[in-house]
Structures are given as structure tokens and as C-alpha cells.
Image: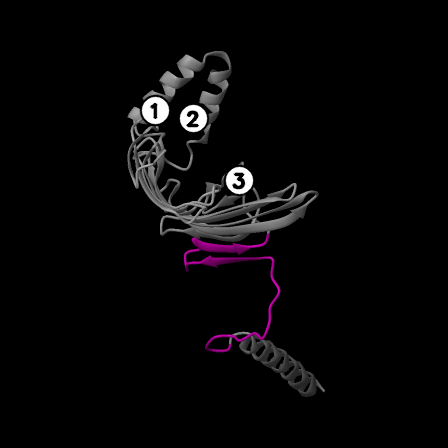
């Protein structure tokens, strides 16, 4: 009897162990797993050490507010949208692809943006389209934009803008002076320098700005299909044009 009990116990343990090993091996098949279709709200692409390199997400799970990624805070004021966010080897956000679009009471609002960021800063290149319709009037802009960014900016400079906004309410001159000081230190500033695309005025062409974002040169085809080349001074006045306007 004792021998039979020992045998049964040994057999039971061996059987249980075999089932566990079989179940484990079923979920550890070598090679890639294939799925015909998968529904998911968010995917985090990570390195072996856990560093997030890409986030693919729906609107609800888009990171903002108090969310953190790679032990770094995300943009508190950023609107939730569907899309992707990219992160570099240091775990810092370095660009993204977002889009949205919905009907409204008197029209619709839609947009798409693909951006690449300066290291630990904001976008230096952006592919952008915006489509608004209000009261029967539709406005569409589509462009490839290249921006200058402040040399020492970081993704945590939002508090500087908030400080300046509060100061502007009581002392606009002091706010302007402090802003200029931050620009001199390379903490704030930057401007759109090159835009290739279509404006709201339906001008299609190449638009060049100076380091303060002021228009300096435009080569475009206007809404009347006329080609124009224009140059501007610092105050926005046309100083040269081809063809010259005739009265």
C-alpha cells in the first residue's frame, strides 16, 4: 500500500510538472507570432531595458497631463489626439504624428501633423495640413515648414511662458524685457523660416522669413494663377517685385 501511494504521488507530481512545461512551451514558441487581426487601444514599443521608443495610441490613452514616459513628464496642455510619439535613446520625445477631424454645428475641423523635434526641444520640421469649414466657408492650408529653435531650450520651458504671461497682465514692458533676456540666453525664441505649401489665401509657393519670423521673400502662384516674386523690408513693405504691378 505504501509503495502504491508513493507511486501515485510521484506520478501525480510528474504529470503536473509535465502539464506546466507543456503550457509554458506553448507560449514561448521560437520566431515571430502572427496575428490576422488585433484590436488594441495603445502600443508601447520598448527597448530591452524598458526605454519607450514609440507610442501608438488612440485619443483616450494619448499621454498628457500627469502622465510620465521614461520617468519624464509629458506636455500638460497638449490636446489628446490619435497618433504616434517618437522617443530617442535618452528617452526624450523627439517627434510625432497626430491627426483628428470631426463635424461641428456649422462645418468641420480636421488636421494632420508630422513633426521632428530639436534635441530636448520643439519641432524644427513639420508637415502640416489644417482644414476648417465654418458657415459654408472652407479654409485649407497644407505646408512643409522648417523652424529655428532657441539653442538652449528644453521641453520643460513652459513655466517661463506662464511667468511672462502673468507679468504681461500687470507690466507689459517688463514682460517684454524679461522675454528678450530669455531669448539672449537661448532659452526662448525661434521662428518659422521656410514654408513650402498653400496659404489660407490660396497662394501656392515658397515663403522665406528672417530669424524673427518676418516675411522676407515669396515666390508663389496666387489664386488667379499668376506667378509672383516679392521681397520685403523689416516692416513688411514690398521693396522689389516681379512682375511689377501696373496701374
Dot 2 or dot 1, earlier in sequence = 2
Please identify the dominant SS of the magenta region. loop
Q: CA distance from mark 3 to mark 1?
A: 23 Å
Coordinates of residue 71 in the picture (x, y in percent): 46, 44
Pointer 2 local density, CA inside 10 Å: few below 14, some 14–19, many at least 20: some
Q: Quadrant of the C terminus?
A: top left
Coordinates of residue 213 in the picture (x, y in percent): 35, 33
Q: Does residue 32 belong to the magenta stretch?
A: yes
Mark 2 touches mark 1? (CB < 8 Å): yes
Q: What residue is shown at x 65% (from left), y 45% (from top)?
A: 107
Q: Is residue 143 above or below residue 237?
A: below
Dot 3 or dot 1, earlier in sequence = 3
Coordinates of residue 48 in the picture (x, y in percent): 41, 60
Number of the label disc, if any, that sits on residue 78: 3
Compared across the picture, whether 25 is left or right of 135 comes to left
Q: Quadrant of residue 133?
A: top right
Magenta span of residues = 29-58
Q: Is residue 12 above or below residue 99?
A: below
174 and 159: which one is in front? 174
39 and 19: which one is in front? 39
Q: CA distance from mark 2 to mark 3?
A: 17 Å
- Residue placed under numbered mark 2 in the picture: 160
Number of the label disc, if any, that sits on residue 182: 1
Pointer 3 local density, CA inside 10 Å: few below 14, some 14–19, many at least 20: few
Compared across the picture, whether 79 is left or right of 5 comes to left
Helix, strand or loop at label 3? It is loop
Amino acid at each position: 500500500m505504501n509503495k502504491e501511494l508513493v507511486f501515485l504521488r510521484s506520478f501525480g507530481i510528474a504529470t503536473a510538472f509535465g502539464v506546466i512545461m507543456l503550457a509554458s512551451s506553448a507560449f514561448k514558441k521560437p520566431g515571430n507570432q502572427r496575428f490576422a487581426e488585433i484590436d488594441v487601444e495603445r502600443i508601447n514599443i520598448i527597448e530591452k531595458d524598458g526605454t519607450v521608443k514609440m507610442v501608438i495610441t488612440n485619443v483616450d490613452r494619448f499621454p498628457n497631463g500627469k502622465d510620465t514616459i521614461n520617468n519624464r513628464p509629458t506636455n500638460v496642455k497638449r490636446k489628446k489626439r490619435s497618433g504616434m510619439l517618437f522617443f530617442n535613446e535618452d528617452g526624450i520625445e523627439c517627434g510625432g504624428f497626430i491627426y483628428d477631424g470631426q463635424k461641428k454645428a456649422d462645418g468641420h475641423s480636421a488636421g494632420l501633423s508630422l513633426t521632428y523635434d530639436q534635441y530636448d526641444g520643439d519641432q524644427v520640421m513639420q508637415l502640416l495640413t489644417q482644414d476648417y469649414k465654418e458657415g459654408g466657408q472652407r479654409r485649407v492650408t497644407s505646408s512643409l515648414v522648417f523652424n529655428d529653435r532657441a539653442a538652449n531650450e528644453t521641453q520643460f520651458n513652459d513655466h517661463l511662458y506662464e511667468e511672462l504671461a502673468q507679468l504681461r497682465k500687470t507690466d507689459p514692458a517688463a514682460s517684454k524685457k524679461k522675454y528678450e533676456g530669455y531669448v539672449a540666453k537661448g532659452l526662448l525664441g525661434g521662428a518659422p523660416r521656410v514654408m513650402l505649401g498653400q496659404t489660407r489665401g490660396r497662394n501656392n509657393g515658397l515663403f522665406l522669413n528672417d530669424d524673427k519670423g518676418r516675411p522676407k521673400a515669396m515666390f508663389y502662384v496666387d489664386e488667379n494663377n499668376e506667378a509672383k516674386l516679392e521681397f520685403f523690408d523689416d516692416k513688411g513693405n514690398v521693396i522689389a517685385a516681379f512682375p511689377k504691378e501696373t496701374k
